[in-house]
Amino acid sequence: MNRFRHGSLLAAALSAISSGASAYELYSTADSTLKLNVQGALGFFHSDESYNQGGPIDPGSVAWQEAFLRYGLSGTTRFPEAGNSSLYGEFNLVSNGTWGEGDAAGYTDGTERRTDVDRAYAGWRSGDLFPALGKDGVDISVGSQKVKVGDGFIINGDGLSVGNNLAGGSANRGGAYYLTARNAFDKTAWLRLGGQQGWRGDLIWLKSDNEIKAKPELGVAVLEHVAPEGTVGLTYVKGLDVEDKLANAFSGQRDGLKITSLRAQGNAGVKDLFLSFEYAHEDKRLGDEHAWYAEAGWTFSGMPWQPRVGYRYSRYSEDYDPLFSGFSRGYGTWFQGEVAANYSGPFQRNAGIHMFSLGLTPHPDVAMGVLYFDFNTLDRTQGDLDAKELDLYVDWTIGNFTVSPLVGLYKPKKSAEDGGSQLGSDDLNLYSQLVISFAF
């Protein structure tokens, strides 16, 4: 498996969990299916150091556990007499929680438990009704669903899940901060136009119910050209509203925010090459911001274990708003560094980041790799989060389960007392996690 093209096995497993790709068939005819979806994950986490990013947390080591279970139904019905158009839908609940001492940034305290609706949507696909647009060239869906745009650099679900340690618990989404159990937007309307190749586009309206994000409402337009050599896309995002009583000076700017993004990704017709790029410009009330990255990778497909090497540079301006950027192709997209992206910062703003990667596939069911990050703060008046991080991971799929141990070494330049975020010292942090995910 080429991790640059398809992500790690954990990414594939979590993608299956998100989409309900594995399911038990309850009912099936030539034109209709009804499936039971059961997916989940269990994670064990330990960090030798803690960070002053969330609620109250003491310096030193912290250990915690997270879990979620997603369960529900999905179905489709095809209408041969109406051009093979079809209706589809999904409904599920998610039960999630955090145990132990809470996460290393203090976003959870270990007491979080919640069961809530995640996905509840219905849609219609056009089948062969509009041949010029391709198979299912018109696809309309409404309800609570996950939305991903492009590579997930700007929008990939509503997954931020803090707990009782912030805002007196009013923003609690049930914990599972790392696993991001609930990632559907509360309300959406999504029109997809075009098939799998050539020109295609999206018109999307979405509304978040995430209090820590100030419940923003967005309009999104996407135009893409998809070819075997790669995809080129243009995205426009307009902030329509936020909930004023939840907003601060930063999140309040999402009302009226304008984002224009240009991206490209593919192999340019070269089998073992991977190229990816995106530039996003933000027109905000208090000034323009931007973020961009350029990434290249190569797979030595003729060698044992198919080594994959890659380099990426990304840069986020001082007050860039990452909005709903989320887990995409695997580790490092778009949470750069397991410690940095989740606990210590930077959180996709005020930073230039170098990433070097090496991936190996010793067996079709086993992927392993090493990621190295060098974080450089742009404006140190906002704090100095310069740091280096090395992450080593293995993803091992056994039947319906994927077992993913990871070890991270994180070294900040400064402690929280000197302008950084690591409490008590600037010592090397040994971080470890074990995530077991499954889908039936």
Image (tube, rainbow, N blue to C red):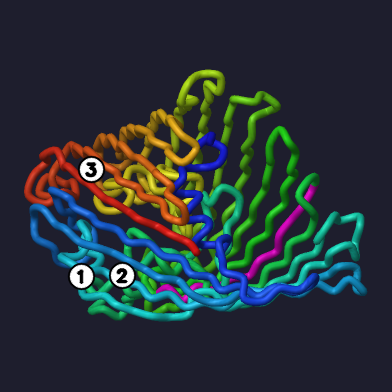
Disc 2 and disc 1 in contact, CB within 8 angstroms: yes
Q: Which of marks 1 and 3 precedes in the sequence? A: 1
User: Could you tell me if residue 398 is visible in this image?
Assistant: yes
Disc 3 and disc 1 in contact, CB within 8 angstroms: no
User: Percent from the top left, x then y, of residue 222?
Assistant: 68, 55
Choose top left, top right, bottom left or bottom right for residue 26: bottom right
Front one among 71 and 418: 71
Which residue corresponds to the image point at 44% horizontal and 69% vertical from the top-left?
A: 182
On screen, residue 64 above or below 240: above
Which residue corresponds to the image point at 36% horizontal and 70% vertical from the top-left?
A: 212
Q: Which residue bears the numbered disc 2?
A: 175
Which residue corresponds to the image point at 50% horizontal and 45% vertical from the top-left?
A: 329
Which residue corresponds to the image point at 18% horizontal and 46% vertical from the top-left?
A: 420
The 10 Å Cα crowd at callout 1, few under 14, some 14 to 19, many 20 or more, is many
User: Percent from the top left, x then y, of residue 333?
Assistant: 45, 45
Q: Which residue bears the numbered disc 3?
A: 384
- Is residue 206 part of the magenta span, yes or no? yes
**Mark 3, mark 1: which one is toward the viewer?**
1
Q: Which three-letter amino acid code belongs to the residue tagged 2?
A: Gly
Q: CA distance from mark 2 to mark 1?
A: 8 Å
On screen, residue 156 above or below 163: above
Label annotation for residue 110: 1
Choose top left, top right, bottom left or bottom right for residue 217: bottom right
Q: Which of marks 1 and 2 precedes in the sequence? A: 1
Per the rendered image, the range of residues in magenta is: 199-210
Secondary structure at numbered mark 3: loop
User: Could you tell me if residue 240 is visible in this image?
Assistant: no
User: Percent from the top left, x then y, of residue 216?
Assistant: 49, 71
Front one among 102 and 386: 102
Secondary structure at numbered mark 2: loop
